[in-house]
Amino acid sequence: MFGDIMGMMGKLKETQQKVEETKKRLDFVLIDEKSNDGLLEVTLTANRKIKNISISNDLLADKEMLEDYLVTVLNKAIEKATSVNETELAAVAKEGMPNIPGMDMFK
């Protein structure tokens, strides 16, 4: 019984380490998103850090339109990055879950 607990603790620690490694790796996974007309492009990491914003000169003349574009494109990029992030971390966590009775809901 004690050995089982130690084994589970080791497995959890290992999983935690893998989660941390995955988070670091996600800093290098880039998500590109652009407006439909290509006038605004943003690049984020899968950890939702903005790496680059590229704005066409055509948008600089219209502050209100630029603001709308930024909100729309950034939100789409954040949504994609969040999806990648959650999928990757869930896969690592699921793989490392010890076989605990009643914990089948995580599989």
Image: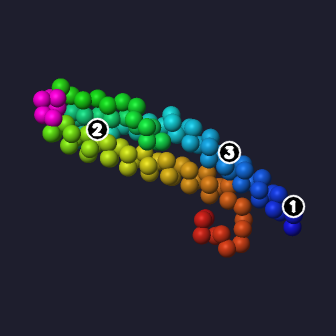
User: Is 91 left, or right, of 6 in this rendering?
Assistant: left
State the CA–CA distance, disc 3 to disc 1.
Answer: 21 Å
User: Which quadrant of the structure image shows residue 41?
Assistant: top left
Mark 1 secondary-structure assignment? helix
The disc, 1 or 2, on the residue closer to the chain's N-terminal end is 1
- Dot 2 corresponds to which residue? 34
The disc, 2 or 3, on the residue closer to the chain's N-terminal end is 3
In this orientation, does residue 99 appear?
A: yes
| Residue in the picture at 18% in, 26% down | 57
Amino acid beneath label 2: Lys
Furthest-top residue in view? 57
The x and y percentages for residue 96 are 68, 55
| Residue in the picture at 36% in, 30% down | 52
Q: Nearer the viewer, residue 95 or 102?
A: 102
* Residue 40 part of the magenta-drawn span: no
- Dot 3 corresponds to which residue? 17
Amino acid beneath label 3: Gln
